[in-house]
């Protein structure tokens, strides 16, 4: 039986950011932004480079200016900081990340373009 923190479930299915097929630019910006926030939490190891710089995205065709990833992480923080602020230790809910943790920490959360 799964653990329950709240009297009601927040969601019984994965929550995804999605767009219609007519707006590929928006879909790409959302996917790269999520990827950037998740990678910002990734540590550097002997085998992999960590941080949002590990997957630099320069996409002027999408309307993204040079340095947009650094600016994004500077404004909202990495994914872990967002989680803690809104659902975790810094919120009223005090939820553990659990499956919302990084794949490398046995969580189920991975960037859309996980390598």
Image: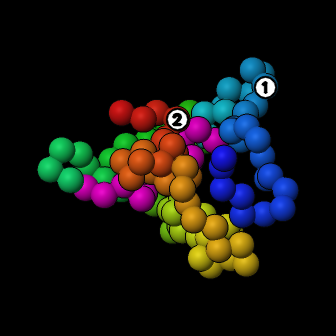
For this orientation, the residue located farthest to the front is 1
Residue depicted at x 68% and y 76% = 91
Question: Residue 1: x and y, percent?
Answer: 66, 47
**SS for callout 1:** loop
Residue beneath disc 1: 20
Going by the image, does 7 lie left or right of 41? right
Going by the image, does 11 lie left or right of 72? right
Question: Residue 88: x and y, percent?
Answer: 62, 70
Q: Nearer the viewer, residue 27 or 12?
A: 12
**Residue 112 visible in this rendered orientation of the protein:** yes
Q: How many marks?
A: 2
Going by the image, does 38 lie left or right of 1? left
On whether residue 33 falls in the magenta region, the answer is yes
Reply above or below: 100 against 93. Answer: above
Q: Nearer the viewer, residue 50 or 95?
A: 95
Reply above or below: 57 against 23. Answer: below
- Which region of the structure is painted magenta? 30-44
Residue beneath disc 2: 112
Front label number (2 vs 1): 2
Residue depicted at x 60% and y 33% = 28
For this orientation, the residue located farthest to the right is 8
Residue depicted at x 31% and y 53% = 50
- For the C terminus, the quadrant is top left
**Residue 67 visible in this rendered orientation of the protein:** no
What colouring style does the render use?
rainbow
Reply above or below: 92 against 38. Answer: below
The mark nearer the N terminus, 2 or 1, is: 1
Magenta stretch prevailing secondary structure: helix
Q: CA distance from mark 2 to mark 1?
A: 17 Å
């Amino acid at each position: 039986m799964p653990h329950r923190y709240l009297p009601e479930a927040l969601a019984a299915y994965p929550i995804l950011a999605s767009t219609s097929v007519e707006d590929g630019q928006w879909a790409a910006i959302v996917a790269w932004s999520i990827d950037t926030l998740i990678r910002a939490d990734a540590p550097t190891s002997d085998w992999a480079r960590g941080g949002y710089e590990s997957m630099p995205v320069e996409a002027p065709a999408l309307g993204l200016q040079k340095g947009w990833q650094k600016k994004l992480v500077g404004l909202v923080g990495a994914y872990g900081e967002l989680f803690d602020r809104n659902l975790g230790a810094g919120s009223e809910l005090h939820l553990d990340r659990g499956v919302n943790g990084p794949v490398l920490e046995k969580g189920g959360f991975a960037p859309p373009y996980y390598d």
